[in-house]
Image (cartoon, grey):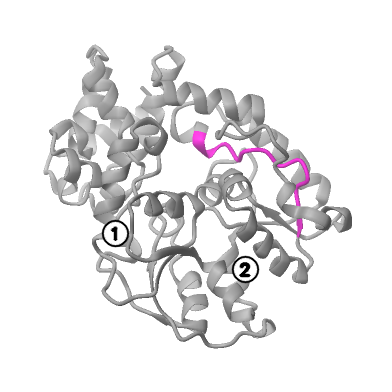
Amino acid sequence: MNDTDMRSILKCVRCGTCRAVCPVFEVNGWESSGSRGRMLVAHGISQGLEVDQGVFDSINTCTTCGLCEQICPSGASPVKVIENLRHQLVLQGKMTDAQKLIRTDALEKGNPLGESKDRMAWLGDSRNDLPEKSEYVFFAGCLASYRYPEITKKTFDILRKFGVTVLEEEVCCGSPLLRTGSDPSELMSKNLEQIKKIGAHTVITGCAGCYTTLKNDFPEELNVLHVTEFLADRLDELDLKKLDLKVTYHDPCHLGRCNGVFDAPRQIIKSVCYLEEMKSNREKSKCCGAGGGVLKGYPELSLELSKNRLEEIPKDVDYLVTACPLCRTNLKRGGPKVDVLDVIDLLEMAMG
């Protein structure tokens, strides 16, 4: 365990403030399933604590949502400690079956979903008319490309009006590996090489996980925008009509709390319909329950986290809107009474 992590662990004064906001602790109620407990477990491991199943589950059930860091009065960084500890355990061969599958599929197939089909099939005929050079490149991401090809195509159809191109040989950004303890450098290098070849100075993505990874974790600094940030500055150039709808918005953890992107999605939503906020919003938004490998490694827990988040949907809204395909996937799993849309779905409706 490195010195930075040890300093963070020692910053934790065991006050328990984080217990009030940790989504996993809310469901499980075990001390070891909250951030305070995980910091105690991490300290124990540094002192030789055996990594049995209980310890292993404590470390791997964190969604890396960052609520604990946002509220911590001591300034500790539990998420970074957990991610680094997962990496150390992976180096020792201590991994869940889900972690092994994520790593194998991402490295061998270019995505953690195990998909072998053409990643860029969503492009359709558009792939025959792509500029070789551009200032802007759209990074679609794995989930968007394979699970939401229609909205991914809609997103690019809007972006290409502003000269945006794509990576024709895009692979996973590396976030699923990074959050679950594996080395994403091979994937990052492949994407970085293509970005340089295109000559892009800005990467645009619609996935919160891709966003934070491209922006904060790549070996070279990139100018990264979420698609809502890019389009919020260009709404006057889109022919939009008002929709007779009332919606609510879920802030993705890795977009909002971790990177401060709160206003752009709301600006787009408010430009086309009425927005009613969820009780917990912006930096206090609750996690959807999918991040940190929890959806794949602990699906039952992830489902309960989703259901807890859905309890905050205001009455009489037409849609629950978010700005991340992973959040959308898990929120839909929770069985909401209204459909879950991407912000771009609303924009496309208003352009229709």
Q: Residue at x 32, y 64 (%)?
A: 337
Mark 1 Cα-neighbour bin, 10 Å: few <14, some 14–19, many ≥20: many
Res 106 → quadrant: top right
Q: Is residue 150 left or right of residue 277?
A: right
Q: Picture coordinates of residue 328 (x, y %)? A: 45, 55
Give how far across and how far down residue 319 sits, in percent.
Answer: 41, 70
Q: Is residue 169 magenta?
A: yes
Q: Nearer the viewer, mark 1 or mark 2?
A: 1
Quarter of the image with the N terminus is: top left
User: Which of the image's four quarters has the C terminus?
Assistant: bottom right
**N-terminal-most mark, 1 or 2:** 2
In the image, residue 299 lies in the stretch drawn in magenta: no
Magenta segment main secondary structure: loop
Could you tell me which residue is drawn at 46 percent across and 83 percent down? 273
Determine the secondary structure under disc 2: helix
Seen at 43% across and 12% down, the residue is: 93
- The magenta-colored residue range is 165-176
Count the marks: 2
Separation of residues labelled 1 and 2 (CA atoms): 28 Å
Label ID, residue 230: 2
In the image, residue 182 sits, relative to residue 160, either above or below, namely above
| Residue 309 in the image: above or below residue 321 | above
Front residue of 321/207: it is 321
Residue 280: give its label.
none
The residue under label 1 is: 310
